[in-house]
Image (cartoon, rainbow, N blue to C red):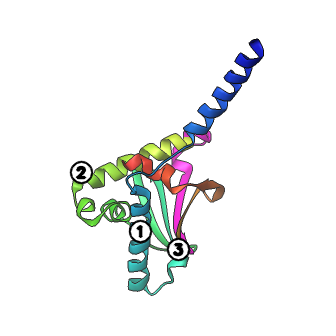
Amino acid sequence: MNLFKKNDASLSKKLKGALTDLSVDIFGYEKMVTKNIINRTDYISKRLHVPRERLYIRIFQKDNKIKSFLYDQNKPLTTIPTEELAYFFMEEQMAKLSNTQNKISHSIKQYLKEFASANRIHEERVRVWIHIKEEKVVVRAFQDEEFIKAIPLNSLIKYFK
């Protein structure tokens, strides 16, 4: 009888581990954010006459403030104020609200803090790069300029809910 209990405990641990990584987008939030990022990047691409695949949004924290910049590959183009950054993640009506803009800033800070802690680096050295590749949003994390890992978009946007 002990043999079955041991297997049940092992199976229970495996299921518990699998369920912690399970993420269901029942409200279509990830799809909406993906669409917003693609549309906003398309808008900027047309305005600046730069192919969208070359545009990168780089987000980081400095002096306890969120900073974001738009790059043409490795060439900086312009800063992205937090109020504009909200348009990448929220619907236009919501992005216009100042409390939403504050929430975006706070959420990004929280994500950077937790990511830095999990990866044992200083939170002001974490850089998140977002760009479009083949109709998909690609999110990657860096320590300064050194690649750490790809980040699923849903792990970033769950902080905005």
- Determine whether the residue tagged by mark 3 lies in a helix, strand or loop: loop
| Residue position marked by numbered label 2 in the rendering | 99
> Which residue: 38% across, 67% down?
36
The crowd level at tag 3 (other Cα within 10 Å; few <14, some 14-19, many 20+) is: few
- Tell me the amino acid under the disc marked 2: Asn
Q: CA distance from mark 2 to mark 3?
A: 30 Å
Q: Is residue 43 left or right of residue 129?
A: left
Q: Earlier in the sequence, mark 2 or mark 3?
A: 2
Q: Identify the magenta region.
A: 117-135
Mark linked to residue 135: 3
- Residue at numbered disc 1: 35
- Mark number displayed over residue 20: none
Label 2 crowd bin: few (<14), some (14–19), many (20+), radius 10 Å? few
Q: Earlier in the sequence, mark 3 or mark 1?
A: 1
Residue most extreme to the front: 1
Name the image quarter holding residue 46.
bottom left
In the rendered image, the vertical position of residue 3 relative to residue 150, given as above or below: above
> Left of 99 or right of it: where is 31?
right
* Image spot of residue 87 (x, y percent): 33, 65
Rendered position, 9 above or below 91: above
Q: Is residue 121 magenta?
A: yes
Q: Amino acid at mark 3?
A: Glu
Q: What is the three-letter code of the residue carrying label 1?
A: Lys
Residue 66 location, x and y as percent? 40, 53
In front of the other: label 2 or label 3? 3
Mark 1 element type = helix
Mark nearer the viewer, 2 or 1:
1
The one of 16 and 81 positioned closer to us in this rendering: 16
